[in-house]
Amino acid sequence: MKLWEKEVNAHKLKRALKRFTRGLSKSAAKKTQSSMTRSGKRKKNTKKDKIVAPNIMDLYTTKYHDRMVEFVVEVEKRSREIGVSTNRKVHICFRNTTTITAAAGIWLLAKIESIKVMFPHVKYIVSRPLPVRIAPSHEKKPVVDSVLNRIGFYEAVGLKTRNMQEIANVKCWEVLRGEEVMSSAVGRLLESVTEKLNVDYSGLYRPLIEAMANSVEHAYRSDLYKKTKLSNTNKWWCFAALLENRLTVLICDLGVGIPNTLKKTQPSSIMRKLIEYIGKNLSSDSDYIRASLQVKKTRTKLAYRGKGGTDLQSIIENVEGSRLSIMSNKGNYRFTNKGIKKKPEICWDGSQSISGTIVEWSITLPPLGTQE
């Protein structure tokens, strides 16, 4: 190779290096500009804090249960990570959500209110759910948005509750929460949801009071529940609604759960009888739920205030088409009055725990005067 060829190649290499360096500079400049607002402030990167809610927010079925729990657990995790930081926010996105069930709604509200108590400095961004088509007209309506607004989710995360047109199956829901047993409030709640029908709701009063009492007395037992200064003062949340003559009532607590309290509240003699009834050792959370419903029947001589299950069951057993659902920790139990030919009980365990208990009963109200 001649000397001048070497010089030419050196010049070419130098020019190529300059072009490469200029390219890197331009690329860096573009990235800087894209991360800056028009006012010259750096844009906040909220993508890493964005949590996308499930399409179907539900706790009743194995298909959706764990995804719902994982979503809420992630919200709590991000809130804990941010802590007292004032320049980061948790972004919750409901854009893909088309359905939210009653159990998922009450649990979401209970958890988010508790998270706000634990991490009061955390701020939230919420991408609201989009309207969905409603049969039979297939008109698009903001169903999930209306539900979240109605139950107080937006208020719980520090956003204003909006005045919005509510759908019939949304505005019928009433919400109640508290720390102690509120007998008068329960009466007003049941009266408010049944006032449009001439019905006697007194038969439902005691089961709700007992479920509420259980949350206060057992779910937050001092020997099981680790209470901190930041613990939510509310011990239970209650939903009630009357839609098409069907009354649905749910009560939720974030206590230690039936599987843990049953072992503490019952003597070994009762536990042996419950195991005999179940037909095996109690190994899953759903086993403990089933067993808890038999406590009153088993303890014939001792007074015991249980989950209200026996009373609830008696109501369900007397009204065909009615249903009792209990979720506690990982366990799920459902008893449906389908008639004598069909299996009334369904039990299963999820892989994720709701860290609490939800009791729901749904019945068709008979006309006034037909109840005993």
Image (spheres, rainbow, N blue to C red):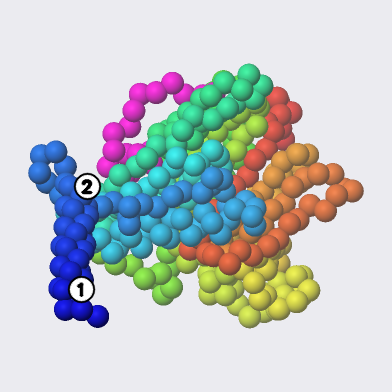
- Image coordinates of residue 343 in percent, x first then y, are 83, 53
At x 30%, y 44%, the residue is 125
257 is higher (above) or lower (below) than 176: below
Q: Nearer the viewer, residue 344 or 158?
A: 158
In-image side of 50 versus 324 (left or right): left
At x 49%, y 35%, the residue is 144
Callout 1 amino acid: Glu
**Viewer-nearest of labels 2 and 1?**
1
The disc at residue 5 is: 1
Residue 138, quarter of picture: top right
Q: Determine whether the residue tagged by mark 1 lies in a helix, strand or loop.
A: helix
Regarding residue 182, the answer to whether it shows in the image is no
| N-term-proximal mark, 2 vs 1 | 1
The disc at residue 34 is: 2
Residue 300 is a magenta residue? no
- Image coordinates of residue 97 in percent, x first then y, are 50, 41
Regarding residue 261, the answer to whether it shows in the image is yes
Q: Nearer the viewer, residue 159 or 177?
A: 159
At x 76%, y 42%, the residue is 318
- Image coordinates of residue 141 in percent, x first then y, are 51, 25
Magenta stretch: helix, strand or loop mostly: loop
Callout 2 amino acid: Ser
Cβ–Cβ under 8 Å for marks 2 and 1: no
Q: Nearer the viewer, residue 365 or 121?
A: 121
In-image side of 310 versus 87 (left or right): right
In-image side of 308 versus 124 (left or right): right
Residue most extreme to the front: 2
Magenta stretch, residue numbers: 152-168
Residue 153 is a magenta residue? yes
